[in-house]
Image: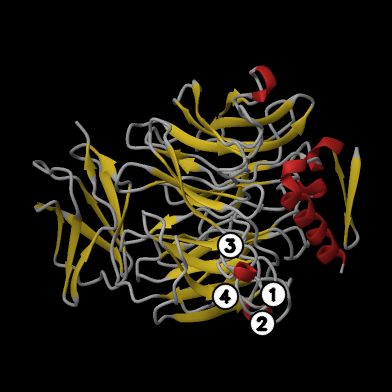
Amino acid sequence: MAELRTCGLSIALPERALERDSVKKFESSRLAYMVLVFCAAAVIDAPAQTFETLISFNRTNGALPGLMSLVQGTDGNFYGTTTSGGANNLGTVFKITPQGKLTTLHSFCSLPNCGDGGFAEGGLVQATNGDFYGTTVLGGAYGYGTVFSMTSDGTLTTLHSFDGTDGLNPESTLVQATDGDFYGTTSAYYGNLVGTVFKITPQGNFTTLYSFCSQANCSDGNFPVGGLVQATNGDLYGTTADGGAFGYGTVFRMTSDGTLTTLYSFDGTDGSSPYATLVQATDGDFYGITNAAYPQETGTVFRIRPGGELTTLHTFCSLPGCRDGFFLTGALVQATDGNFYGATNEGGVDSAGGTVFKTTPEGKLTTLHNFHLTHGEQPYGGLLQATNGNFYGATFIGGTDAAGTVYGLSVGLGPFAKIQPDLGNVGTKVIVLGYNLADATSVTFNGTAARFSIVSDTEIQTSVPQGASTGIVKVATPSGTLRSDVPFRVTK
């Protein structure tokens, strides 16, 4: 057993809980930095935009937000996690308004031996029941991490404690599939176990679906740091940061019962160590990032078709001084303009603290913002496009107290409606998120009117009407008509 000591707190941890493979240099250096803080296409000029630091973490209210991306709740606020800070210096769950008012909802390690977990690396997902679900890297009954649920007022319930044999160190955000259950990954060593895919019900019934490195020479991959995405065909898609045919990571497809197919193995020249969750775009293809690419070791943006054909769209550090940034860990988001937005950990101009970028589906990249220490550096997580059209994210360090920030970035995109879920048959209950919804006059599914009820200024509840077909959901309000960011798919 190893012992983690941080600001007077000692936690017994299995030795394997902190191990990382050599391809995960980023992980080990980041963990070392965290412990230290605990105890102490071509690039073109960016268009007009507005950047704002909403909050600087001060350790009391959290510190060092990790790989998570913020999520917008039905109340219109944003929810996220930090890996450090809070009452016990082992991370927090927080809520922040679009105007920058932050509320700490939970400080981890509030139970003896951190029974509620610690180091919340991944983000949150708001389930159809209104609660939030997430994971912690460490803590729980055995020290290997947890899955938890949390109400919007901060009441936290530990649903599962990993014991090592069922996985350990979950770093990714969960996804709620159309069957109502949650799917996620674990990423670390335990004996021969180097990552798993698991399923857990909202009530906490847990199933390990797949254990990686089960094939010769780990040709199926290992270290699935990123999360999963459920595609339009119902299958789950994800990545591993290591393993595969060449040892540089993979892209895989998995059925809901755990049958895994390796779609692609990175060979290093086309990228390596894909850390982030894929995004399925409106064209049906998947887009993602790699953390490195040899020999530059700088990272890439790639597209992969459902059948496994991969195209490298952009290799970073393509400009002198790496002005386009390098090292990527956060997931891309496809915005309402059809382009993809993301962040790099390092590079750019100013103090080389990372960038925010936009790329077209063809790979034409634009640097939108260069970070420097005063307003945050090293954005490890991805971006959220909120229904007001703006982007929101977090930096790992920097800000007024060098503990990280939450920031907002406007690039001129207008407001829209977000639908949860984005597919279902006639009668399926649907939540519509947005702003200024209190006076909405109609909701239509591809032109077919639906009955609806206004819950608040940011939420409408409706259901798929008889006669609806696949297409855009529209909400008519006195100030204009809001369109959904993706088409609603009517299933048969």
Q: Which color scheme is applied? A: secondary structure
Task: Kindly indicate whether the residue at mark 4 contacts the one at mark 2 (C-beta within 8 angstroms).
Answer: no
Which SS class for mark 2?
helix
N-term mark: 1 or 3: 3
Which residue is tagged 3? 344
**Distance between the alpha carbons at the discs numbered 4 and 1:** 13 Å
Badge 2 vs badge 1, beta-carbon distance below 8 Å: yes
**89, 471: nearer the viewer:** 471
Q: Mark 2 points at which residue?
A: 374
Residue 434 x, y percent position in the rendering: 31, 65
Mark 4 packing: few (<14 Cα in 10 Å), some, or many (20+)?
A: many
* Three-letter code for the amino acid on which mark 4 is drawn: Asn
Instruction: Report the Cα–Cα distance between label 2 and label 4.
Output: 12 Å
Disc 3 residue type?
A: Thr
**Label 3 vs 4, first from the N-terminus:** 3
Q: Tag 2: Cα neighbours inside 10 Å, few (<14), some, or many (≥20)?
A: some
Mark pair 2, 1: CA separation: 6 Å
Q: In which quarter of the image is residue 466?
A: top left
Identify the mark nearer the N-term, 3 or 2. 3
Q: Mark 4 points at which residue?
A: 370
Horizontal and vertical percent for residue 144? 75, 39
Q: Name the residue under label 1.
A: 398
Residue type, label 1: Gly
Question: Whole-Å distance between the Cαs marked 3 and 4?
Answer: 10 Å
Instruction: Classify mark 1: helix, strand or loop.
Output: loop
Q: Gap in Å between the C-alphas at discs 1 and 3?
A: 15 Å
| Secondary structure at numbered mark 4 | strand
